[in-house]
Amino acid sequence: MKAISALTLIGLSLLPLWLQSPYALHIFILLFIAVSMGEGWNVIGGYAGQYSIGHAAYSGSGAYCTLILLQTFHLPPWIGVWLAICLSVLIALVIGSITFRLRGPYFVLASIAVAEIVRLTALNWKSLTNGAEGILANELPAFQIGGHVITDFSSKIPYYYLGLSMAVFAILINLAVKRSKLGYYLQAIREDQDAASSLGIPLARYKKTGLVISAALTGLAGSFAALYIGFIEPDGVFGLEVSVQAALVCIIGGVGTVPGPVVGAVVLVLLSEALRANLLAQSLFKLGVPETSMVGNFLGENLAHAHVLIYGLLVILVILFMPEGVVGLRLRRRKPPLPATGGAGVARK
C-alpha cells in the first residue's frame, strides 16, 4: 500500500510535465480541493461521528478572510491564509461550544443553522464583505524568495502543485489523527458517547479538538479555492451545497477511512464535470435514446442542471448497497471468513 501511494504521488508530481491541457489541470485542481475538504470533514464526521452539515462556515470564512486581506490590506495570500486558518479555528471553537451540547439530528440541524447565520452575516456586512456583489480578486502577486521570483501564478501549474501539496497534507493529518490517542478517543465517542464518558474520556474536549483540526483543514481548502477561482460571494461559499458536498465525499468513499475521501472526491468531481458538460445526456443519446424525442429534449435541457438530484440518487444507492462506502466495500471483501462450527466441533465440546 505504501509503495502504491508513493508511486501515485510521484506520478501526480510529474503529471504537468506532459499534461499541457489547462482543462485537465483544472479537473485535478478541483479534485485536490475536494479531497482536502473531505479529509477535513472526515476528522469530525468520520472519526468522531459528528455529522456536521455546516462546514461551509469554515471554508467560507477562510475564503473571505484571505481575499479581504489581499484586496483591502494588500497582504500576500501566503501570509493571509494562515490568518484565515486561525479565523476558521476560532469560529469552530465558538460553534463547538454551542452545538456539541446536542446529539444526533439536533446537532446536524444546529450545524446547518450556524452556517446559515454566518452566511447571512457575510451577506449583510457590506462594508467588509461587499454583500451579495462578492469580492473579485485581482491578479495574485508573484511569490518571491530573496528577490528571486519563484512563480507569478500566470498558469494553472502553480495552483496544481499547491493543490497537490494541500491534499497530501490533509491526508497525512488524517492518517496521524487516526493512529493517535486522539483518533482512538474520537472513534470511541463515535461508537458510544455515554460509554466513552464512563471510561473517563472528556467528550467536549476531544470533540472540540477534532473540530479544530477539521476546521483548519477546511479553512485551508476554502482559502485555496478562493484564490484559484478568484471570486467569492456569500451564497457560493457559505451555501448548504458546499457543506453537503464535503459530507458526500466521505459518505460515498467511506466514512472514517483515510482513502475514503479520495475515492469520493474522484467520483463527485468527475460526475459534476460530466453533468456540467452534459456528457451524461450525450452518452444516453449514443445508447439509443432519441435526441429529438420528448424525453431526449428533456434530458438535453435539464440533466446538466440536475446535479442535486443526481447526488441524492447516488447517496440513496450508496446507503442501500454500499453503506460503508466504496472503500468499506473493498475492505469487507478482504476480511477473512469466520471459522465454521460444524456438528463435530459441537460434539467435541
Image (cartoon, helix red, strand yellow):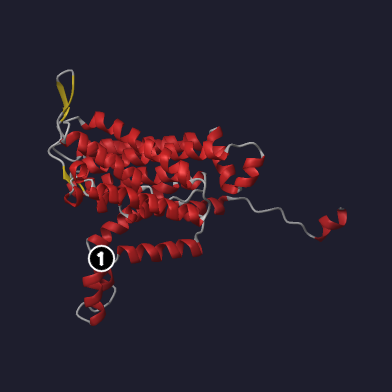
Residue at the outermost right position: 348
Residue 95 in sight from this viewpoint: yes
Q: Residues within 10 Å of mark 1 (few under 14, many from 20)?
A: some
| 282 shown above or below 209 | below
* Near-viewer residue (347 or 162): 162
Residue 7 in sight from this viewpoint: no
Q: Residue at x 78, y 59 (%)?
A: 342
**Total numbered badges shown on the rendered structure:** 1
In the image, residue 10 lies at what x, y percent?
33, 35
Three-letter code for the amino acid on which mark 1 is drawn = His
- The quarter of the picture where residue 164 lies is top left
* Near-viewer residue (247 or 339): 247
Q: Is residue 183 left or right of residue 313?
A: right
Q: Residue at x 18, y 42 (%)?
A: 127
| 28 shown above or below 162 | below
In the image, residue 211 lies at what x, y percent?
45, 40
In the image, residue 28 lies at what x, y percent?
27, 46
Q: Which residue is mark 1?
A: 305
In the image, residue 81 lies at what x, y percent?
28, 33
Q: Residue at x 53, y 33 (%)?
A: 180
Judged from the image, the secondary structure of the residue bearing numbered disc 1 is helix
Q: Residue at x 62, y 50 (%)?
A: 336
Residue at the outermost bottom position: 293
